[in-house]
């Protein structure tokens, strides 16, 4: 089987979950004998010569190419990477209103209708969680038979992480760790910083801040506190990142939502206790092995983190992640989804 994998151009400058998900899926599919070409917009590509096209992210970035693939009747699957705190009923109503308005005024497109259009162009939609699948089914009107849940994955190497490298460089103990795009409002880092107190366990932030007012407010809090440590961004494959997970007592991810958060999978596999948002399918993956944050309740952030610091450490979550959520397992499930279309 030969497939063409298409990711949004933004992954070239945003080193986030979509980039990791797409590149790791491609890497591990090749281990199962799948031929994978990565789409290069500078090269002219005959998409019809592939058995299947896998598009990542349902968004305005990918709408035009999804529409073109549909016109060519390509077998396309899409990993939509979609979640919202709005209900499916609200999504349906928004799209309905837009459809009516569009008959009167041309060129009206909402984010929901764009994502729905990308999903409807695909032969199969591959959400990361059952929660995401429910929104796509009930909000966009995609039938169950055109949906297959494929979870996010994690490198099995994080199971072998040790704290030594991190501890040899950073003199901080018993700390809470955040890893991610710290400048993204969805990650809720500002509220984490505001709720963290001088009496709490030290907080370590690994990630990138930009020049926005939001980031400036975060940096100002960090600079005013001795028990908050900002280490800047680390490449995903940097051994220091895995060591930081292993050295941390608690990994915190207070986002508005996650599906379910690759960094949380990495931290859990490295043996870290978790305090994570309850929104976006996280409870499907982490079950009773995490303390959950209500991102709409600022006080719940530190309440969950403090509870997590009191939990005993064990290897049960690590075993569950190794069995169900490695990129090898994800690639096998993805291949099964492909084969349901190609025969």
Image (cartoon, helix red, strand yellow):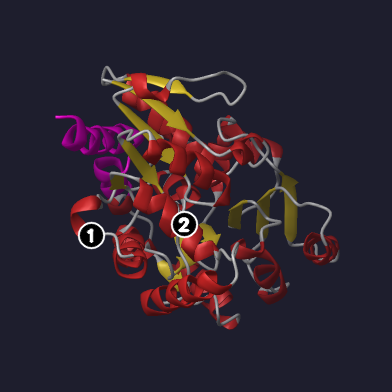
Q: Is residue 219 left or right of residue 45?
A: right
The residue carrying pointer 1 sits among few (fewer than 14), some (14 to 19) or many (20 or more) residues within 10 Å by Cα, namely some
Marks counted in the figure total 2
Q: Is residue 260 visible?
A: no
Image coordinates of residue 253 in percent, x first then y, are 54, 61
Magenta: main secondary structure: helix
Assign the N terminus to one quadrant of the image.
top left
Image coordinates of residue 331 in percent, x first then y, are 30, 33
Give the residue at mark 1: 143
Give the residue at mark 2: 115
User: At numbered mark 1, what does the secondary structure look like: helix, strand or loop?
Assistant: loop
Residue 204 quadrant: bottom right
The residue depicted at 66 percent of the width and 38 percent of the height is 234
In the rendered structure, does residue 211 fall within the stretch colored magenta? Answer: no
Q: Which residues are magenta?
A: 318-343
Assign the C terminus to one quadrant of the image.
top left
Q: Residue furthest front?
A: 104
User: At numbered mark 2, what does the secondary structure look like: helix, strand or loop?
Assistant: helix
Q: Nearer the viewer, residue 11 or 278?
A: 11
Q: Nearer the viewer, residue 17 or 96?
A: 96
The residue carrying pointer 2 sits among few (fewer than 14), some (14 to 19) or many (20 or more) residues within 10 Å by Cα, namely many
Image coordinates of residue 245 in percent, x first then y, are 52, 46
Nearer-N-terminus badge (1/2): 2
Image coordinates of residue 295 in percent, x first then y, are 54, 75
Per the model, the C-alpha gap separating discs 1 and 2 is 15 Å
């Amino acid at each position: 089987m030969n497939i063409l994998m298409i990711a949004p151009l933004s992954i070239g400058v945003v080193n986030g979950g979509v980039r990791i998900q797409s590149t790791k899926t491609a890497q591990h599919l090749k281990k199962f004998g799948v031929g994978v070409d990565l789409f290069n917009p500078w090269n002219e590509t005959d998409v019809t010569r592939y058995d299947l096209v896998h598009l990542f992210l349902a968004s305005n970035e990918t709408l035009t190419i999804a529409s073109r693939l549909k016109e060519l009747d390509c077998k396309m699957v899409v990993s939509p990477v979609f979640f919202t705190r709005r209900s499916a009923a609200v999504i349906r109503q928004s799209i309905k209103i837009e459809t009516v308005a569009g008959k009167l005024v041309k060129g009206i497109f909402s984010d929901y209708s764009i994502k729905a259009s990308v999903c409807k162009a695909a032969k199969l939609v591959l959400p990361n969680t059952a929660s995401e699948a429910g929104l796509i089914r009930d909000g966009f009107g995609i039938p169950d038979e055109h949906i297959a849940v494929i979870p996010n994955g994690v490198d099995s190497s994080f199971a072998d992480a040790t704290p030594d490298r991190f501890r040899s460089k950073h003199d901080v103990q018993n700390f809470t760790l955040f890893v991610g795009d710290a400048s993204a409002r969805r990650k809720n880092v500002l509220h984490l910083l505001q709720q963290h107190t001088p009496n709490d366990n030290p907080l370590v932030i690994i990630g990138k801040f930009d020049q926005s007012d939001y980031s400036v407010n975060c940096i100002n809090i960090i600079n005013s506190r001795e028990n908050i440590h900002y280490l800047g961004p680390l490449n995903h494959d940097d051994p220091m990142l895995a060591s930081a997970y292993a050295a941390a007592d608690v990994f915190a991810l207070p986002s508005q939502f996650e599906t379910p958060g690759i960094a949380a999978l990495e931290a859990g596999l490295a043996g870290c206790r978790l305090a994570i948002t309850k929104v976006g399918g996280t409870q499907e993956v982490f079950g009773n092995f995490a303390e959950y944050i209500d991102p709409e309740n600022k006080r719940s952030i530190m309440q969950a983190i403090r509870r997590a610091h009191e939990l005993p450490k064990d290897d049960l979550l690590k075993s569950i992640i190794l069995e169900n959520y490695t990129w090898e397992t994800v690639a096998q499930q993805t291949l099964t989804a492909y084969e349901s279309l190609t025969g």
